[in-house]
Image: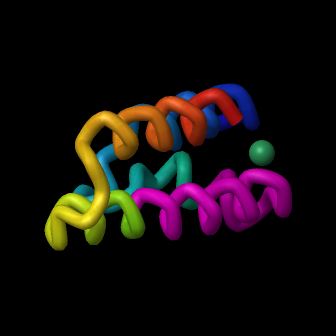
């Protein structure tokens, strides 16, 4: 897997599913993608928590998600 492919996977993954073996292997060997992965995971978890507690309007959540996806 290459960086582009990894980023695509990151954008389209579902954090409730286990990572693909290819993505995991790439992340372990690529510091940039590892960093992206950590940031994305924290952000996704934050979005999930916001949904769960309903503190954030749905529109705002969508905007944040789109911003993260364009990184
Ligand atoms: Zn990479």
Front residue of 20/51: it is: 51
Residue drawn at point x = 74 percent, y = 36 percent: 3
**Bounds of the magenta segment:** 25-44
For ligand 1, give the image quadrant.
top right
Q: Quadrant of the N terminus?
A: top right
- Report the residue that reaches farthest toward the right: 31
Instruction: Please tell me whether residue 52 is drawn above or below residue 17 in the rendered image.
Output: below
Residue 68 rendering spot, x and y as whole percentages: 58, 41
* Position in image of residue 7 (x %, y %): 63, 36
10 lies left or right of 45: right
Location of residue 53 by image quarter: bottom left
Q: Is residue 38 magenta?
A: yes
Q: Quick one: 43 or 14, which is closer to the camera?
A: 43
In the rendered image, residue 10, in percent from the top left (x then y), is placed at 51, 42
For the image shown, how many numbered marks are present on the structure? 0
Name the chief secondary structure element in magenta.
Answer: helix
- What residue is shown at x 54% (from left), y 49% (from top)? 23
Q: Name the side, left or right, on which 19 lies relative to 9.
A: left
**Quarter of the image holding residue 51?**
bottom left
Residue 41 painted magenta: yes
Taking the spot 41% from the left edge, 50% from the top edge, the residue there is 20
Residue 25 shown left or right of residue 41 in the figure: right
Residue at 51 percent of width and 69 percent of height: 42
Could you say which is closer to the camera, residue 48 or residue 18? 48
Residue 60 at x, y percent in the picture: 38, 41
Query: Which color scheme does this rendered protein use?
Result: rainbow
**Residue 32 against residue 71 in the figure, above or below:** below
- Give the quarter of the figure containing the C terminus: top right
């Amino acid at each position: 897997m290459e960086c582009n492919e990894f980023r695509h996977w990151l954008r389209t993954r579902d954090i409730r599913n286990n990572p693909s073996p290819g993505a995991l292997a790439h992340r372990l060997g690529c510091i940039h993608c590892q960093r992206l992965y950590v940031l994305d995971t924290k952000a996704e978890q934050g979005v999930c928590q916001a949904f769960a507690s309903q503190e954030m309007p749905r529109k705002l959540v969508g905007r944040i998600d789109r911003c993260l996806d364009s990184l």
